[in-house]
Image (cartoon, rainbow, N blue to C red):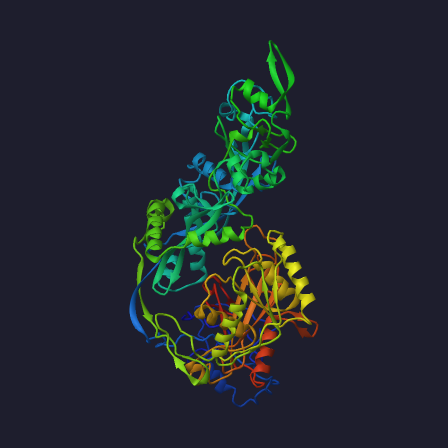
Amino acid sequence: RTVREGPTPAGEDRRDGTRIAGRMDPHDGEPAADELPPPPPLPPNVVPIIAEDAAAASESEPPPPPPPSKPAKPRRHIMARPPNGLGKKGQPIQLLANHYKVSVKPSEEFFNHYYVNLKYEDDTPVDSKGIGRKVLDKLQHTYHSELADKDFAYDGEKSLFTIGALPQINNEFIVVLEDIGSGKTAAGSPGGNNGSPGGGDQKRVRRPYQAKTFKVELNFAATIPMAAIGHAIRGQESEHSLEALRVLDIILRQHSAKQGCLLVRQSFFHNNPSSFVDLGGGVMGCRGFHSSFRGTQSGLSLNIDVSTTMIVKPGPVIDFLLANQKVDHPDKIDWQKAKRALKNLRIKTTPANSEFKIVGLSERNCNEQMFPLRRRNGDTTETVEITVYDYFVKNRGIELRYSGNLPCINAGRPKRPTYFPVELCTLVPLQRYTKALSTMQRTSLVEKSRQKPHERMSTLNDALKRSNYDADPMLKACGIQIAQNFTQIEGRVLPAPKLKAGNGEEFFARNGRWNIARKKLIRTSSVKRWSVVNFSARCDLRGLVQDLKRVATGMGLEYEDPHTVIEESPSLRRAPVARRVEEMFAQIKAKLPGAPLFLLCLLPERKNCEVYGPWKKKCLADFGIVTQCLAPQRVNDQYLSNLLLKINAKLGGLNTLLQIEAARAIPIVGKVPTIILGMDVSHGQPGQSDRPSIAAVVSSREWPLISKYRATVHTQSPKQEMMASLFKPRGTEDDGLIRESLIDFYTSSGKRKPDQVIIFSQGWSERKPVYSGHKHRA
């Protein structure tokens, strides 16, 4: 990626060899202790003295003694792409990218950024999520003249943007919002304010006590020139252009919010049943799309891609609970689990069609849960105790078929509950499911979300048309026009690299695959002190072991016979997973003379086997035993060859090399000691937000090879994307991942230190590294 040139920092060399003076100590390159202010402007009648003349006039004076010199520090520069740095190898091919070109009309206007402060009437801050957009929509509708009829883009939290300034720098407004959907008690509901049975809920929610008053402050924060969007189109990225693109992304989010979409960061999900896939357990996958504006080498584009999130299956609450707990009758529901599953979900109640948020369940069943009902008796009002069941059946005339013996849904407040029979409650669509998915659900999501390229292209084109961005008033005011077709780009199909196997044999890929059958491996391992464990898989174990040994011998591996074969007891097949794993390890300890170096594990199912995760953790994390799992449904020589490639690598062997790697013909890397690093951070899946994130680094070893790697992992704070353990000082020592990788490279590469470091990591285009004096895209 070409590095854009910015202003040269003080004290650095320009490319023409000159040096920029000022604000840097010339002796050590660090900022000077006493920085001088800029010189005052010259009066109009003063002619400045030319520096050369001043120097000539002072030649007769002895020069001052030179300052003490310090050793020069090496200067590092980001490597720029050379002028002819575009690749040329391979067969040219025309490709379509899921980017839509964006054109922008030139504008001298500015985005004005305002800080949004939302408070209740008593000046307490508003902390409820989702309420901000409702308040700001009502504000725009109520005060459009005071806002100079301006449209704005609101991010849902603290930032609001307009094109041009509002009439006032600091603005204050009072907004009254009818808080229908907050879960407040509607009069006439059990546990409500007066419990009166007359009239319907829908009518009562219009009463004044349902309204909520908010104070809204809009305080000016900054301006962003809209011309910065044009800079992004020309590839001239700057801080202003990144901020301007952020405003455009906020406009996209607001546009989708007004269409009733579920928003998950920059992804949008419509309430379209054709986009739902059932994952079981009352959970559905919802296919939506991600869209954002991106600066590219060819200008500004709108990037759209398919995105998937998990949602609660909309519909009757009782149907969700039956599916979630995998039972076939309401009497079998575990209501403690149901309480946890339902908390904070939104429901609509019949017949009033009012929306509420679930806060819990009643302590007693519907036909036993009492509440005080106030009703008129002539000119007086009396309070009577009545069950929720009797209230809805006798006072409201609503037939209840099965709710009498079930708990009620509580959609009120802690000290003022509001009860509804379960069968009158329906879960509203587009509610995110944030709990952890089961193995079966994850597999189902992957399989049902998979799309072929032409299907994905059709989905994305439909998403762009359905979004109708051209109708958005803010995008119109920005002069944004979005092309309706994918961007065509030129690619190159590179020739497949030649591999080198054992005995010096070289071979090419055919039909996208390298066939390793009947070939020796480069460096083979010895499979010793090993055993077979069988978790109730049905197969010919003796035949499997013999076939594995035969194929291994053909590939050059030394395979001893297993010490023993350990079968799981038939009585444990339906036992809890943890017990099955513990019992298997008890047998291993009893039947083996010492800890095995390798265990071959047979599983009963190829996919979604519940034993796999706990077994791997026990072997690798607790005992450090190398394992290889397989589900022996269809085993042939090709399958066993692939299995042995994994086993050989896990035991320290080397399967193949790149032909140019073996010949030390890789440019740059093969001539100078070079370490190659791969970095990433993985986080807990939804529902596991308290689990630590895992930072991992893989690093090359045994230079000049690039096919041998080691892995190092550390834990860090949950959801932390920045890798915190690359450098980890501990007194005078360093326990960081990089140090471990460098030491391993040194010891495995003939005591050579790397002269070059190459880092691979995803997401660099999303990051904005800042260097002293420059801002670059890495």
Residue 73, position in %: x, y? Answer: 56, 81
Q: How many numbered marks have been drawn onto this rendered protein structure?
A: 0
* Placement of 668 over or under 2, stated as above or below: below
> In this view of the protein, which residue sits in the foreground, 119 or 394?
394
Q: If the image is split into quadrants, where does the N terminus sit?
A: bottom left
* Placement of 251 over or under 564, stated as above or below: above
Who's the residue at 57% across and 31% down the image? 184
Residue 496, position in %: x, y? Answer: 37, 74
Residue at the extreme top? 378
* Placement of 551 over or under 306, stated as above or below: below
* Placement of 376 over or under 530, stated as above or below: above
Whether residue 677 is visible here, answered yes or no, is: no
Image-based side of 347 in relation to 370, left or right: left
The quadrant in which residue 256 appears is top left
Whether residue 297 is visible here, answered yes or no, is: yes
Image-based side of 528 in relation to 99, left or right: right
The quadrant in which residue 245 appears is bottom left
Residue 93, position in %: x, y? Answer: 29, 68
Residue 694, position in %: x, y? Answer: 58, 62
Who's the residue at 48% across and 87% down the image? 56
